[in-house]
Image (cartoon, rainbow, N blue to C red):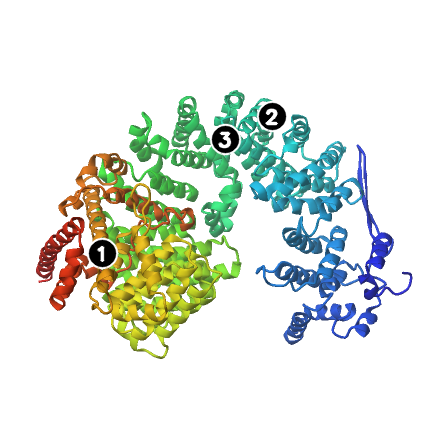
Amino acid sequence: MNGGFSFNNFLHSDINSKFKKNYQPKVWYSVSSKTLTISIHTSSSLFSHFNFQSTLEQNHTNMDLQTLAIVLKSALSPNPAERKAAEDNLTKIQYTPQHLVRLLQIIVDANCDLAVRQVASIHFKNFVAANWSPHDPDEQSKISPSDKELVRQNILVFVVQVPTLLRVQLGECIKTIIHADYPEQWPGLLQWVTLNLQDQQVYGALFVLRILSRKYEFKSDEERMPIYHVVEETFPHLLNIFSRLVQIVNPSIEIADLIKLICKIFWSSIYLEIPKKLSDHNVFNAWMVLFLNILERPVPLEGQPADPELRKSWGWWKVKKWTAHILNRLYTRFGDVKLKDPESRAFAQHFQKNYAGKILECHLNLLNAIRVGAYLPDRVTNLILQYLSNSLSKSTTTYSLLQTRLDVVLFEIIFPLMCFNDEDQKLWEEDPHEYVRKGYDIIEDLYSSRTAAVDFVTELVRKRGKENLQKFILFIVEIFKRYEQAPIEMKPYRQKDGALLAIGTLCDKLKQTEPYKSQLEPMLVQHVFPEFNSPVGHIRAKAAWVAGQYAHISFSDSNIFRKALQSVVAGMRDPELPVRVDSVFALRSFVEACEDLGEIRPILPQLLDEFFKLMNEVENEDLVFTLETIVDKFGEEMAPYAVGLCQNLAAAFWKCMNTAEADDEADDPGALAAVGCLRAISTILESVSRLPHLFAHVEPTLLPIMRRMLTTDGQEVFEEVLEILSYMTFFSPTISMEMWSIWPLLMEALAEWAIDFFPNIIVPLDNYISRGTMHYLTCKEPDYQQSLWIMLSNIMNDKNLEDNDIEPAPKLIAVVLQNCRGQVDPWVEPYIRITVERLHRTERPFLKCLLMQVIADALYYNPSLTLNILQKLGVATEIFNLWFQMLQQTKKNGIRVNFKRENDKKVCCLGLTSLLSLSADQLPLEALERVFKATLDLLVAYKDQVAEAEKEVTEDDDDDDDMNGDLETDDDEDDDVGSDKEMGLDDEDSDEANSSRLQKLGAQTKVFRSTDDYNDESDDDFSDDDELQSPIDDVDPFILFVDTMKVVQASDPTRFQNLTQTLDFHYQALANGVAQHADQRRLVLEKEKLEKASVAS
């Protein structure tokens, strides 16, 4: 051990254990009531004695440490060629044995260049993240078990020793390993943590324990079980360390770091549930005493950074923040005495009785800093105000305590936070774009003290308004009066700004509450609208915002509304950017409230011009929302501007995307604004949908967006771009060759990554096939039929895809069969084959129905061909038995289990009816009778469902949106369904028809829920694919059935007579009823045809 230390020896466990014993660094902690000393001692540098040559000589396939270090250094080279060669080299050797361990050796070697160690740490982190736990369970790990074990044994020891820059990377690796291996493959981890909490490596143990606890932060039920064991083993030691740290006099910033780690561990452990270890009142009290101590003790003045950004991130303020965070979580999640579970309620009562008031008292004392002008970070203020807001309703005790100091809190702390301040002024003047971004950023709102103050006022008047609303409004009115009476150079502009914010915030309450409700118009006229002309920018902006909040009230004088609208429009040309943005935001409300569009119509071109000037300056989705509102309101009147709007929106979209890519942040406002631009384009396309000639003019502008964003580059906006593509392929007079160039992109996306978007992709694919049928059928370069087949067969045959993933596939096969009737004979057999294969392993009832409908569509396409194919595949009997079984399957209440939608029933009717047309040698009399009866039953069910849907539409017209009324009259209408009686039957089978309204209501709510919310019972199948049009829409199943049977009767009278003689009275009555209904349908269709001709002429 005193000579050269070779890596090969290091791999042997006996030497390794000696090595760890002799060379393990010691981190000594001496904890007393006065000081905490931290020092790191190493008996020897771990890697200073490596024999770099020995490994290379012994194993030529591996790279020795010195050579690896050189390669890593080359990866930093300013020379691109040298850097590329190093990166290629690293990629080539990354899977060789011991490579990962060598990287770790370099990372922790203090004698190595820090830049090289950093590159090694990044490479190490990325490799561990990508390869430690393969995504596919069947895939073998690329890291050997021995290498993993070596990493696990050593990474914990050295994570504390390396510089912070490297510790961050190693921490990420530990996180990856814990998530993959703990507890099964890393059972010793908890023991290591527990021992080191009692030994010298306290910081390392806390660092690792924080990562471990965070794994279970959002886990629930059984997945959360391991954290309970972790808490049992470690929290007694944590509490002991925490207690000793709190007792230290004049603690250093390092103590703050340790306490912060303890707080984070506690937070993750209690986030969803209080572990039993902490439910013990004595144990919980010990923790609460310490948290309250941290909360109420002053933050050390010494060492606080002067820079505001650094100051709010300073260790002791972070400790204060995490303490407030924990106490808020305990109060909001576990402190509600209304909880139903007895144990939870008991805990809540204990918390309310013993701690809620003490915490509130501490919080109020902390807030006093704002009154006296002392420092309190925004985030801490935000958390305290959240606690105060909860205290208003959680407990009468806490509210009573708050009430004694409420006036001071409300008028001397909350209201000043709502006012314009020095920081706002600085940002307004120096960076108005950032001022706008912060003002409209919902993430900023989560941490803002102003937002928390506004929320407190809102909650106060909502929960305790009776005793507080009047005095708060009187306070605001007094500010308005002082402002009005003061000379212009002495006006309290900042207080007026806060008062305007308060009035705008309380608009919902004031619009509903007298006497304020009747005074809103004069209040606006006297105190808000004059500020459109204020010399102070932020007052003009706030006036526009408040005007927007109240745009929907009923003005007694329409001129007041008109003048306010004109002022808001004028604000869009204000020299100050924030005023222009707030004016656009307000304009949306005025446009929505405007009953006479004549107010806006004359200035529409000018409005749109101002819009796009502003969109060139600011990436803000609220601007786009306003534009969408205008387009939606004016509809086809936007036609003259449609092309220009699309061009401007496309330009804004590209600008936003470039900004978002440069910033590379998921919540970047540029990315949100980009989505808004695409949504606005869709709104424009929808508004001019009855003017198809315009689509050719906007196509050149939109094609580049579609071509780029329907690849992996556009995953964030894929859904929005698909919607645009759907409009373009549906409403354009014809689908151009340029638009057809998008088809291969859709095929590629589905094949590689976009299976989640399959329900969206089917819409444009349907348009291509149904509206460009001849091109789809005849083009060979590319071969659209072949590419569709490859995509569909791959998806249908993919055993890794769940049933709900492939539901659009059979729908797409139906699109082909229905639109290309008689023109795709060679494809019928392959499509039937993959349908039958998938049917054999399908479990989900809805997918079974869709697959069976492919068979029905194929029969409607060509019954003879389809029957021959089924017989050739040897599945004809099996398929028809399954189909009839599914048709007959009902629940206890008589409702059908399968083919619930109108379209499902219609497709099955058309398929079965087509079978009836086959000759006797293909369809014997016994089979004919079975098919005939099944078709009649299904036609009756279809008629009932259609009739009920039509009745619902009529009722909706009579009583718009009165959904409760519809439900309440269900029982009264049961006797009115009656379609079976019209066909000569009793109403014993009418349960299904009676339930269809509830089914329709289910369909209406479906669009607001993901398909995962439905189980197989409901199966999200109640609604029809109304958006997809089909050639069978014009086919009446009753007329087709009657005409088919007339052909059978004419071509083979004996066979027809034999069929009718086998029918009992029930089916004879049904057949007569269907025939009568078919005659009625002929008359209705003829009348509709004449009406359409009349309208056209």
Q: Is residue 464 above or below residue 1079?
A: above
Residue 438 placement (x, y as % from top left)? 49, 47
SS of the residue at dot 3? helix
Q: Earlier in the sequence, mark 1 or mark 3?
A: 3
In the visual, does 50 lie left or right of 1066?
right
Residue carrying label 3: 389
Q: Is residue 646 visible?
A: no
The crowding category of the residue bearing disc 3, from other C-alpha atoms within 10 Å (few below 14, some 14 to 19, many at least 20), is many
Q: Which label lies toward us, 1 or 2? A: 1
Pick the residue in front: 963 or 550: 963
Mark 2 or 3 closer to N-term? Answer: 2
Q: How dense is the environment of label 1, judged by Cα within 10 Å: few (below 14), some, or many (20 and up)?
A: many
In the picture, measured across the screen, residue 384 lies left or right of residue 523, that is right
Q: Quadrant of residue 46?
A: bottom right
Out of 955 and 3, give the one closest to the viewer. Answer: 955
Say which mark, if any, is on residue 266: none
Residue at the image point whose x is 55% and y is 31% from the top = 334
Task: Place residue 469 in its image quadrant.
Answer: top left
Q: How many marks?
A: 3
Q: In the rendering, at what x and y percent does residue 733 appear?
A: 24, 68
Q: Amino acid at mark 1?
A: Thr
User: Where does label 1 land, which residue?
Assistant: 935
The three-letter code of the residue at mark 3 reads: Ser
State the CA–CA distance, disc 2 to disc 3: 16 Å
**Quadrant assignment for the N terminus:** bottom right
- Residue designated by label 2: 355
